[in-house]
Image: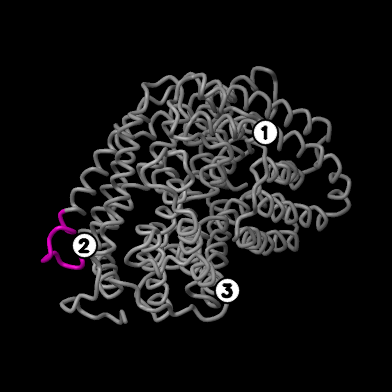
């Protein structure tokens, strides 16, 4: 179910994205290779089981299992937001529930007004494209748009009358409200859990960087730069998590001090100021304690801790102010605007889903929405990752229908057995999908097929045949659309990120050179530079996996990354206890 951020075979930005390189990057072995499971795989797995079990068993008790498709739409919202602090998770999951209900409402109204398969497929493809863009623009995270598309596409082809729609939407909103409670329930036990995990990841990445910083002036293929990029991304994510976590608490203050140490190891991993904080073993020990259930370790003050915490408080205040909220809305609108790099991906999704649906309908497949969902699930940040997902989805679905064939007799023993099978596969999907998408699809496929059994038994051969045909056609047409709709904006995004990085580096250098610069300004410019480097790396990775575009400005990209890291390292010696900075529980 989850559209995980695991990216096997990710291309390196060190190579020019010419077609031969891209083709060599389409290696099935790397796309299907298993990785380590996520450190939080059990959280969405348990959440979706609890959020689904109560509505499922309630409908079983009243004898209305045919309504499970509507409650499941709300229950699946429990999959979202597990990497967010609870203050932001509450808003994010509420938005997911409302978005799910909105997409379902459009599908139900359309299904009640027309029986034209051509119109239903067109609406399904349009919804899939809109859901893809909104999920990418809001950066809601896994499982992304796939769940929305699965629900809205299935509802398009379900018999519906206008008078039934309010009741069906009420079921979705009720189950969604319960899923919201399930997603936030861990806050009662461990209020700072997401922040602790984010900081632990930053400490672990900083430990890797400190243990092997790599030569700064040699070839970029050395491991050191990659470690610094990973550490920069993890530290940036930790700061963002802490900024969004709400008012400071003693635990969050300790976490902020730990991020200061992780940042010191990232910006200055070699000998010099802050080198004591870059002890890899100490960073790993702190990470283990932070991730655990005991007290958060209290590190000794790192250079500049008072300034850093003062800066994070000032930044938090700006983000909460009216102007900060307006700036966030403007940034979201820019990601959705006419010049957005998301537009080519939206066009790919629209064309690919429409072609898949119409082709399956022309061949007489009774459930073309499966092909729409298959095509929609393929579209990732670039065409190379989309090819990987095509292989993963196809293999997972084909193996999944074999699992469905084996478990179908068990599910037909009783309605309770059917409910238990669906809950089991829902848990298994989340437990396996962080290893690789294809492995999770092995569990998703039988669950999706079993949902049809709630409305009545269907011939097994028909279900299996339709699913296999939909999978093959959906994957083929979806990837064909990805190759035909080029994303020439990817390189433009790299150039914009380069300009932003140059501006952020210049601002950081000015504050480093100015002895009178306020602590908040130094910290703001340093974090802005870190964020720009993370964005630059993401833009470079995306562009490197796209075909049919002009070459990346590779030399400028490498020079900007190296200069940015040098500037970050130069900020470390400038940090020191600032007597003029207000003390906000920092030391």
Q: Crowdedness of circle 3 by 10 Å Cα count: few (<14), some, many (20+)?
A: some
Judge whether 143 appears above or below 349 on screen. below
Q: CA distance from mark 2 to mark 3?
A: 33 Å
Q: Crowdedness of circle 1 by 10 Å Cα count: few (<14), some, many (20+)?
A: few
Judge whether 33 appears above or below 428 on screen. above
Is 517 colored magenta in this rendering? yes
Please state if 366 lies on the left or on the right of 515 as rendered.
right
Place of residue 504 in the rendered image (x, y in percent of width and height, measured from the top left): 23, 49
Label 2: which secondary element? helix
Please state if 9 lies on the left or on the right of 269 as rendered.
right
Q: CA distance from mark 3 to mark 1?
A: 35 Å
Report the quarter where the C terminus lies: bottom left
Place of residue 119 in the rendered image (x, y in percent of width and height, measured from the top left): 52, 26
Q: Nearer the viewer, residue 341 or 225?
A: 225
Q: In the rendered structure, find residue 522 and report the number of the disc placed on it.
A: 2
Residue at position x 24%, y 53% in the image: 327
Place of residue 35 in the rendered image (x, y in percent of width and height, measured from the top left): 64, 47
Residue with the mark numbered 3:
292
Task: Compare marks 1 and 2 and give the one earlier in the sequence.
Answer: 1
Q: In the rendered structure, find residue 272 and report the number of the disc placed on it.
A: none
Q: Crowdedness of circle 2 by 10 Å Cα count: few (<14), some, many (20+)?
A: many
Is 483 colored magenta in this rendering? no
Please state if 307 lies on the left or on the right of 221 as rendered.
left
Q: CA distance from mark 1 to mark 2?
A: 46 Å
Label 3: which secondary element? loop
Viewer-side label of 2, 3: 2
Residue with the mark numbered 1:
29
Do residues under tags 2 and 3 come within 8 Å of each other at their CB atoms?
no
Please state the extent of the stretch shown in magenta in the rendering.
510-521
Q: Nearer the viewer, residue 276 or 548?
A: 276
């Amino acid at each position: 179910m989850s559209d995980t951020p695991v990216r096997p075979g990710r291309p390196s930005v060190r190579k020019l994205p010419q077609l031969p390189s891209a083709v060599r990057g389409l290696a099935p072995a790397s796309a299907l290779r298993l990785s380590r499971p996520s450190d939080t795989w059990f959280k969405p797995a348990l959440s979706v089981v609890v959020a689904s079990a109560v509505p499922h068993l309630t409908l079983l008790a009243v004898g209305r299992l045919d309504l499970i498709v509507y409650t499941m739409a709300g229950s699946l919202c429990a999959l979202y937001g597990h990497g967010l602090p609870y203050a932001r998770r509450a808003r994010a999951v509420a938005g997911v529930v409302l978005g799910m209900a909105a997409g379902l409402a459009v599908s139900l109204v359309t299904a009640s007004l027309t029986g034209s398969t051509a119109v239903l497929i067109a609406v399904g493809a349009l919804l899939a494209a809109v859901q893809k863009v909104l999920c990418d623009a809001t950066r809601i995270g896994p499982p992304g748009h796939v769940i929305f598309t699965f629900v809205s596409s299935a509802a398009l082809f379900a018999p519906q009358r206008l008078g039934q729609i309010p009741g069906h939407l009420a079921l979705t909103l009720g189950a969604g409200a319960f899923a919201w409670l399930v997603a936030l329930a861990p806050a009662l036990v461990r209020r700072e859990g997401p922040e602790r995990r984010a900081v632990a990841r930053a400490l672990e990445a900083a430990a890797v960087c400190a243990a092997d910083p790599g030569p700064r002036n040699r070839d970029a293929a050395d491991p050191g730069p990659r470690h610094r990029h990973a550490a920069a991304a993890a530290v940036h994510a930790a700061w963002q998590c802490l900024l969004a976590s709400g008012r400071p608490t003693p635990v969050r203050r300790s976490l902020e001090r730990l991020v200061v140490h992780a940042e010191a190891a990232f910006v200055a991993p070699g000998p010099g100021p802050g080198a004591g904080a870059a002890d890899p073993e100490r960073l790993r020990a702190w990470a283990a304690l932070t991730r655990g259930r005991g007290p958060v370790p209290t590190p000794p003050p790192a250079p500049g801790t008072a300034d850093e915490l003062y800066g994070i408080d000032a930044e938090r205040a700006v983000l909460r102010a009216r102007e900060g909220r307006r700036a966030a809305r403007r940034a979201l609108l820019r990601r959705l605007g006419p010049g957005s790099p998301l537009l080519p991906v939206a066009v790919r999704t629209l064309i690919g889903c429409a072609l898949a649906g119409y082709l399956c309908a022309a061949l007489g497949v009774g459930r073309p929405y499966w092909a729409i969902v298959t095509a929609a699930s393929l579209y990732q940040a670039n065409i190379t990752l989309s090819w990987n997902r095509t292989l993963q989805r196809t293999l997972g679905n084909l193996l999944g229908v074999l699992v469905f064939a084996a478990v179908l007799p068990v599910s037909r023993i009783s309605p309770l057995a059917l409910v238990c099978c669906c809950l089991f596969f829902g848990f298994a999907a989340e437990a396996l999908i962080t290893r690789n998408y294809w492995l999770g699809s092995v569990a998703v496929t039988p669950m999706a097929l079993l949902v049809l059994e709630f409305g009545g038994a269907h011939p097994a051969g028909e279900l299996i045949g339709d699913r296999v045909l939909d999978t093959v056609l959906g994957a083929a047409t979806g990837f064909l659309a990805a190759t035909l709709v080029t994303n020439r904006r990817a390189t433009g995004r790299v150039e914009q990120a380069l300009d932003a990085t140059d501006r952020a580096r210049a601002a950081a250098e000015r504050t480093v050179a100015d002895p009178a610069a306020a602590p908040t300004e130094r910290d703001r410019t340093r974090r802005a530079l870190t964020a720009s480097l993370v964005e630059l790396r993401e833009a470079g990775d995306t562009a490197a996996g796209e075909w049919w575009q002009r070459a990346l400005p590779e030399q400028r990209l490498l020079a900007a990354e190296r200069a940015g890291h040098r500037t970050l390292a130069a900020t470390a010696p400038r940090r020191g206890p600032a007597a003029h900075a207000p003390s906000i529980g920092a030391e």
